[in-house]
Image (spheres, grey):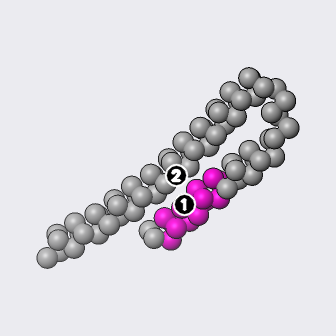
């Protein structure tokens, strides 16, 4: 019975860790794609730099989503 309980607890901890890794990894990938595509657009059209405010707001929303996922994962542990 003790081994079964330990297996369940380790499975729960592993699933929470995987959830946290996937959510933070997805946020990092989203920021990388956003930054890369913005730099490509700037290379093609230098006047697109005036729209940097919108890009910064979108990046901030991605970061807030990652922070919330991290805090949720931290409270679940």
Mark 1 vs mark 2, CA separation in Å: 7 Å
The stretch in magenta equals: 62-75
Q: Is residue 6 above or below residue 15?
A: below
What residue is at 80 percent from the left and 41 percent from the top? 52
Image vertical order of residue 15 relative to residue 34, above or below: below
Q: Is residue 53 above or below residue 23?
A: above
Q: Which residue is mark 2?
A: 24
List the residue tagged with mark 1: 70
Q: Are marks 1 and 2 in contact (CB under 8 Å)?
A: yes
The residue most toward the top is 44
Q: Quick check: is 28 in the magenta stretch?
A: no
Residue 9, position in %: x, y? Answer: 29, 69
Mark 2 Cα shell of 10 Å, populated few (<14), some (14-19), many (≥20): some
Magenta highlight on residue 64? yes
Q: Is residue 1 left or right of residue 35?
A: left
- Residue 67 image point, x, y percent: 61, 59
User: Where is residue 77 shown, x and y percent of the image?
Assistant: 44, 68
Q: Main secondary structure of the magenta part?
A: helix
Q: Residue at x 46, y 57 (%)?
A: 20
As drawn, the residue found furthest toward the bottom would be 1
Q: Nearer the viewer, residue 46 or 6?
A: 46
């Amino acid at each position: 019975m003790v081994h079964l309980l330990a297996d369940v607890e380790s499975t729960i901890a592993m699933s929470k860790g995987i959830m946290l890794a996937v959510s933070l990894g997805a946020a990092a990938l989203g920021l990388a794609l956003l930054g890369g595509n913005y730099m490509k657009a700037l290379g093609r059209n230098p006047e697109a730099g005036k729209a940097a405010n919108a890009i910064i707001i979108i990046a901030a929303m991605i970061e807030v989503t990652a922070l919330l996922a991290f805090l949720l994962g931290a409270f679940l542990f």
